[in-house]
Amino acid sequence: MERIGASEPFTYSMFVWSKLSSPKWRDAWEERFHGGGQTNAVITEIRGNKSIRVEVYVPRLEQAEAIRDQFGGSIRQLKMENWAAKAPPASKPVRVRDQFIITNTTDEKKVEALRDENPDRQIIHIPPELAFGTGDHPTTATCLRLLCDVASELQSADRKRWSLLDLGTGTGVLAIAGRKLGAGAKDILATDYDPLAIKVAKSNAKRNGAPGIRFEQSDITEWSPPRRFDVIVANIFANVLIASVPQIKRAMVAEGHLIVSGILLEHWDDVKKALVQEGISVTQVEKRGKWVTALCRR
């Protein structure tokens, strides 16, 4: 049994969403529910049946129903137990360039201690929630590093104000980081298909002192960009990314920056082909384990 996430402590009833799946989709399930703490998610191999069972433990019925509405499967309610005693510890803080420390601890005293110990870095606090992207997954962490690099380049070019589009925002960590790196207070749009993610992201923006970010629920495959952006970050499934490249191009300014991630190695060639066909050049490729993140220019 493989645990790929962990939730904040709960002491009352919980709900479990579950679904049987082919083992070939394991990576996709990991990508959706991994994030160093935002859910209690477990993948179990079923011997002999050549299948896996994916289970997600959440405190509220509407959370389980939202997952079922998106992926199918079933829901059951668990009896009362001391879930806090079962919750695994938060993951280690993630250091991003010389700019940030990302932490998902729920202990406010530890957050303050990090601030005191690291006066030259900005602390971004993303507690565990049912949304992707607490900063420790390779895709999110690499996006954060490349976003720091792009912001530094814009600063060197004396760009005092720039705009950011965060597609598949999840917990909002990339949009929040962009705001702290200098993106304009009213020049950031963050979208996600999941309404729960939007709710979580808004809360995180407020928690981290990042006002002005516009969060919007939308399906990128049916989405029309409201304007053009200097920087776009798209940390989403490869198949969704490929289908959305034309929309993404329309959202890019000339010479704009694009960071794409959430891409498994075996899907990278198809993603790159889709980008190049739309006139988007790939300038840097970062591989972390089985994941690919790339920096592109129009």
Image (tube, rainbow, N blue to C red):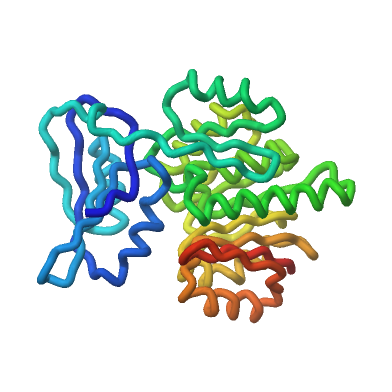
**For residue 5, side relative to residue 182 (left or right):** left
**For residue 265, side relative to residue 16 (left or right):** right
Q: Position of residue 246 (x, y in %)?
A: 61, 71
Q: Quadrant of residue 32?
A: bottom left
Is residue 84 shown above or below 130?
above
Q: Position of residue 86 (x, y in %)?
A: 23, 33
Q: Is residue 221 visible?
A: no
Q: Is residue 75 visible?
A: yes
Q: Position of residue 8 (x, y in %)?
A: 34, 32
Residue located 19% across and 62% down the image: 45
Identify which residue, 278 or 147, lies in the foreground.
147
Quadrant of the drawing holding the C terminus: bottom right
Residue located 25% across and 55% down the image: 43
**For residue 57, side relative to residue 102 (left or right):** left
Q: Position of residue 173 (x, y in %)?
A: 55, 42
Residue located 55% across and 61% down the image: 261
Is residue 286 shown above or below 213?
below
